[in-house]
Amino acid sequence: MIDTLRLTAEDAIGLLERKEVSSAELHRAYLDAVAERDGELHCYLRTVEEAEGDGVPIALKDVISTKGVETTAGSKILAGYVPVFDATVAARCREAGLPVLGKTNTDEFAMGSSTENSAYGPTHNPWDPARVPGGSGGGTAAAVSAGLAPWGLGSDTGGSIKQPSALCGNVGLRPTYGTVSRFGVVAFASSLDQIGPVAKNVRDCARLYSIVSGKDPADSTTVEVPPVELPEGESLEGLRIGVPREMNEAEGIQPGVTAAVQKAIELARELGAEVGECELPRSVEYGLACYYLIAPAEASSNLARYDGVRYGLRVDADTYYEMVERTRDAGFGDEPKRRIMLGTYALSAGYYDAYYGQAQKVRTLIAREHAAAFERFDLIVSPTSPTVAFELGEKAADPLAMYLSDLLTIPSCMAGLPGLNIPCGLSDGLPVGLQLIGPQLSENTIFRAGHALEGALGFDPVPERLR
Amino acid sequence: MSTHAWEPVVGLEIHVQLKTKTKMFCRCANGFGGGENTQTCPVCLGFPGALPVVNRVAIEWTIKLGLALDCEIASHAVFARKNYFYPDLPKGYQISQYDLPSCINGKVLVPTAGGDHEIGIVRAHLEEDAAKTTHVGGRTGRIGGADYSLVDFNRGGTPLVEIVTGPDVHSSEDARRFLQLLRQTIVELGISDAEMEKGTLRVDANVSVRPVGSPELRTRCELKNMNSFRFVAQGIDAEVARQIAVYEAGGDVVQETYDFDAATGTLTPRRSKEEADDYRYFPEPDLVPVEPPSDLVERLRAEVPESPARRIRRIEAGLDLDRAVVLVTGGLDRLWEATVTAGAERVAAANVIANRLAGVDGDSVDAAELARLVEARDRIPRSTLDEALAKVGEPGFSAEPYLAQEAVSDTAELGPIVARILEANPGQVAAYKGGKEGLLGFFVGQVMKETGGKANARAVSELVREKLQ
């Protein structure tokens, strides 16, 4: 009997190597768990019954194109769309022999922080099904925590990997922009979108990152990636950790979150890290506002292709323009429509300089501010999310409150920097996430620190109610 | 009513499809061939998640063209997205260089009898072509009112260079001469067939008029849909006339885009609803800036051949401007030079090449053999010369067998034929004697016809002139 709730990918690799279990048996065990628990959680939009490959099965967020498997990005406008090609990350998983378990739920076009914006219904948090799993990658994060996948891939534009991992109590990496190919991943905001791994622990996360990362000729924005080192060791000797005041004292951070994060920082000091204060004033003050100009602007353009002409939904009409209008009206939910409008406005003649152009300038400032911090520190830390998982419906009617969920993840995304979430404790029985941010291409340092802290924290990633 | 003279002010926008092996942003085959929608892939069909990757050759060719047009080559060029909805645009945006194009501030010197006429090149930028739409049904042939529209995405994503001139063109004749030179430049670079009939070269004209001597730039109208140099010239003339009439009637020209119908000579305004006002340009985040290293630019500069304009100036010295223009814009000046070097007389060689070898690939002709034909042109029968010139481009052509035939120049043989022709055409004879000396050619032609092309044209011509004195 395979205990999918506890099994890590590394454990699974051991079982496979010792031939104690086959890849197909693993795949079946997870699908059995899905059959048992996903009715309540709704992590998967669809499962793949045939196991292909000889490795550890994987869950893929539904923004990742999978050849022959419907890919909807959580939107009605892509209902029935079956890609004829694999995203590069899907192809790399296939080449590595990882059978796909299924496609996981996401806010529509990855726009959201709770997975409530999925056109196919929300995902529920395995720690408390009355609460959200975070978003947009709530499906993958909840699946990993609920033992419905040993690991999975998400996509992160402003926090869609890190924030759900924080709310579900697992490990999620948003890698350095350009280290993982975006080819075949349904685009939200191209200059911000990054694909990354979600797993039960840091070593699994690093292992999956090593499989999917690397330069891709099909994505011009990718770069050469240094070899990934699986983290070992328990010491943080020699590591300089910065604690940006604004990101740790921001309004709206719950006391329970602050307490757990402070404890983790104290632990880092005990492990030998040199901890000091730093400042990122403009990043925190302007990050969110700039993000909500740049991301919707790019989204308004990226979503223009859904016109009903070639694939996905089409609502017929007498003329071409009417057909496009009706298709988009029927196919897009409220959040994509809201962002298309925001973005269209931000790019309009006469407003471009004041909005999109200005936001790009501030983005450069944010990158510089981070670079300055990294002259003194190897990593900076903060809570990943200001709050623990909130209740379904709690923020659904208030977009601004929802947007604030990403206040602390957004600045480093704007700067293209890597960030890792590790669980660092519980508040009111719900996981609290610690965010570790490093300079570009510092994933190995982040993994090393995350691994050492994870060992010292001893967090049990299995939701209490499922133990 | 105003009585002053008007000067046309015209700027041209030229689109050139590059004949790269593959498309601009994907590796689909580029060019004609294959059934509809067979040269397509997720990238050029705009499937979710598909990303563009620039075609390096297209970048190099654009730089090369820029160098040929005397442009500055940007060390940092950026692709942008031009956003609008149309079924020929699968992504909902066109990827195009915008505020930071690859080539800026160039010029073309058009040789004229009055000196070089400089046409400024504001910019030359790279973009992707749209797909081809066919609107079926309805009266307009456009999307509004069509019963349905067909889209062929084979053309979508073809590399397209847009060249924008300054408002330096002041007549339809200026436009024609400039376009001929530009086309020849493009063809010689080997980057495009640049054929208007096939749409691989497309020209739009921005036309305004102003009182002669005024420096002002008045409201301009854009002309589209002109698929030959001749139609461009006719379109400009028609629009200039229309605008002058508007001003002279006390009206004002309203900015508008017109389709020029060459068959009727009419200008039809496009429905403004189909023209998007705001393209919401922003830098294409899926691509990185184009930053060509200077050694690449220098290598490309070294590959640019001597410009057609310079060659016109060079060869006109020993010839004349008109013949030089015809030879160069026909791509035949190098053959002419080689033929002259091989011993042919300059003007005779120019006449034979320009009049008889238009459309022939100059490189396929053995200049030494052609020189022998030019030299013997009056001595051998016309029919023999025709036959020889028709074959002069074939591999291994030798003039030898044709040179053996002598044209009939014996007066005793030709005399009676000339007399017969003059007798049969009394009206023309009278007209000639009345001063219409141009009729000489008519009589010579009749004699040539009578002799089956075997007569020596010069001998016939002398004989006719003698008899008519």
Image (tube, coloured by chain):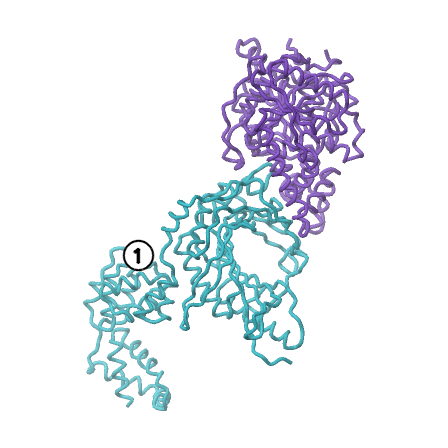
Q: Is residue A129 above or below residue A317?
A: above
Task: Name the amino acid, label 1.
Answer: Ser
Question: Which residue is under mark 1?
Answer: B364
Q: Is residue B259 above or below residue B46?
A: below
Q: Quadrant of the N terminus of chain A?
A: top right
Q: Position of residue B110 (x, y in %)?
A: 43, 66
> Is residue A327 shown to the viewer in this render?
no
Residue A2, quarter of the rendered image? top right
Residue at image x 81%, y 29%? A394
> Is residue B307 shown to the viewer in this render?
yes
Q: Position of residue A157 (x, y in %)?
A: 64, 33
Nearest the camera: A270 or B93?
A270
Nearest the camera: A105 or A211?
A211
Residue B220, quarter of the rendered image? bottom right
Nearest the camera: B137 or A282?
A282
Nearest the camera: B298 or B335?
B298
Q: How many tags in the picture?
A: 1
Q: Is residue B107 above or below residue A15?
A: below
Q: Is residue B410 left or right of residue A244?
A: left
Q: Position of residue B55 (x, y in %)?
A: 48, 43
Determine crowd level at label 1: few under 14, some 14-19, many 20+ residues with C-alpha closer than 10 A: some
Q: Is residue A210 left or right of residue A35?
A: left
What secondary structure is found at the residue carrying circle 1? helix
Q: Position of residue A144 (x, y in %)?
A: 66, 19
Chain B: its colour in the image is cyan
Residue at image x 59%, y 53%? B134
Q: Which chain is purple?
A: A
